[in-house]
Image (cartoon, rainbow, N blue to C red):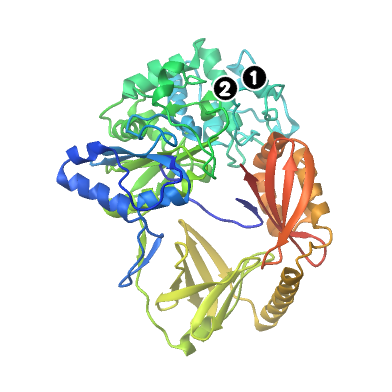
Amino acid sequence: MLKLGRSPVGVAICIFSSSLVGQTGPSRIESPAVRDLPANVQQHIAKVTTCLTSGVIIKGDAHSCTTLAERMAQLHVPGVSIAVIHNGAIEWARGFGVEQVGGAPVTADTMFQAGSISKPVAAMAALRLVEQKKLMLDADVNTELTSWKVPESPAAKGKPVTLRELLTHTAGMTVHGFPGYAADAQVPTLVQVLNGEPPANTPAIRVDSEPGSEWRYSGGGYTVMLQMVLDATKEPFPKLMHDTVLAPIGMTHSTYEQPLPAAMRANAAVPYDGRGNAIAGGAHTYPEMTAAGLWTTAPDLARYCLEVERSLDGKANHVLSQQMTQEMVTAGKGDWGLGLQIGGSKADLYFTHGGSNAGFEGDFVAYEHHGDGAVVLTNAQGGGALAQQIVQSVATEYGWPDLGAVVHTEVKQPTETLAKYVGVYQFQPGVYQVIRLQGDQLTAQLSQQQAFPIFAEGDGKFFFKIVEARLEFMRDSSGKVTGLVQHQNGHDSMMPRLGDDDAKHILDEQAAKDALAAKRYAEQKPAEGSEAAIRKDIADIEAGTPDYDHMSEGLANATRQQLGGLKTLFAQLGAVKSVQFVSVDKSGSDTYMVEFEHGKTEFHILMGTTGRVESLGLRPMQ
């Protein structure tokens, strides 16, 4: 679910799967070839697939394990394909579940749509053209585009768009992603997609912010890159990719052909939605090939990862030179290189990318130098949740420095010590972290969210059990607690402690909001103005002119950051047909079901006492 007014941080991980729908219990679902592997590798596979855990483990406590089969059944994932890289080679690659309900089992050679993982593979072709002097990284793209030009925009402030900016998502381009075209739908030309002309189902791809000024994910930018490559080479893109990237790397079960040729369909997974229903008409067609057009397998993507790793070491430069590969993984704004997201410590950097098409979700992650990585592919919407758990299980089993389950040691502290940390800490303007003591248990509650218990692991250091995040309280020279730092996903957020008078004011406000929320939850009546606010926000965002004065500061900031993607989403959904109140939840948020011309979306809206929208969440329904 997309949540506005919050600031969650996530890490993309490498996973692909095809759901196991309707199957329950810990039945054996891996492909038979597992028994042919060495005993130590079979043990790795067994440990990875028989004990999926939460991200936090308490040392000394028994922690519940869930088998892969059980999680697939719970999440309606028919099949999964996993490839694991260890010591610079593919150690194992296996399929789990079935290509479609009642169909053949998934194998290592089962093909899946890669979604946005198409981007880093396609970026490699563009960078090869740069090395061949057929494209330039830092020139105005309009000097190289011939079939279409990036239209002028006042928002660009006179700055040109460059290929480097397109590849790093810093070009200020619109259109976050693409829904694809169902089997019975007319497919637009590339120029029609670029201009947002019928039958294209996404808005025109344009510059709406100053190039180079900020990081903002844009599949639209990669579609401009596709036109650049076509203009420079005069070759069909699937053939170019086969000849210059896929074949040299050894990705023999991969193609950018859209739709997938009939001869390959027998070996392709069938896409499913998040409820276990097959996508009507099968896989969607994506003319935006650089952004979402790759069909591939888990081992083939592992070969891509190995090519990057080996090219960085100068050992296998089949596509790019060592120098260009290093530039590809050099992090800039948003921790993105030229097509890849970069994470990890300076000593152990990794590169990664996730992807989601209609009925397919996946991710990959690989370390730059110590030769480990993983790919997981799924053919179910929402398979990303399963993917994260599988990658975490791989990371834990193989002892990666990142992404594995975190083990904490809980240390009991006396109540009088815990009481010193009670207070209100400012996260950002209008958003507070409230620390309370209930009996002998400390809790942390961020504004408009529920309270969660926190547990001591040392002097002034606490952790959550529900998510990998830590709180560290700061003291002055006299020992007085003056603030806290929240550590989560490599980001540190400093929160100063409010004085007693300010804290009382915030707590009184929160108590009044909690009382109002409890009253509204009991009555189950929508807040005055909430339906009108939803209709207004949809219309304003689609027009590109949100009314930020109508929102809380946190919601306004989140909307500014996500405006491009929200505009694309609402444009894809079409006109609003109806807005129906469903219920009030315990936080006092109203739930509505909004029916659009092309689908339904669940909205959660929290209205403030002054009539402003405090927070807004939405979840498209399959």
In this view, which residue lies farthest toward the front?
102
In which quarter of the view is residue 16 placed? Answer: top left
Q: Residue furthest left?
A: 39
Q: CA distance from mark 1 to mark 2?
A: 7 Å
Labels 1 and 2 touching (C-beta < 8 A) = yes
* Residue at screen point 34% across, 33% down: 308
Q: Which residue is mark 1?
A: 188
Residue 112 occupies quadrant: top left
- The secondary structure type at the circle numbered 1 is loop
Question: On the picture, is 224 further left or further right than 136?
Answer: right
- Is the residue 95 above or below the residue 588 in the image? above
Question: Percent x, y for residue 110?
Answer: 37, 30
Residue under numbered circle 2: 287
The x and y percentages for residue 153 are: 73, 29
Tell me if I can see residue 399 in this picture: no
Image spot of residue 573 (x, y percent): 70, 37
Q: Residues within 10 Å of mark 1 (few under 14, many from 20)?
A: some
Quadrant in the picture for residue 444: bottom right
Image: 511 above or below 94:
below
Q: Amino acid at mark 1?
A: Pro
Q: Position of residue 181 (x, y in %)?
A: 61, 26
Residue neighbourhood size for the residue with mark 2, other residues' Cα within 10 Å, grouped as few (<14), some (14–19), many (≥20): many
Identity of the residue drawn at 66% across and 65% down: 448
The C terminus - image quarter: top right
Along the viewing direction, whichever of 84 and 523 lies nearer the viewer = 523
544, 31: nearer the viewer: 31
Q: Is residue 455 left or right of residue 578?
A: left
Asked if 4 appears above or below 170 in the picture, the reply is below
Give, as a three-letter code, the residue at label 2. Answer: Pro
Q: Can I make out residue 188 in this image?
A: yes
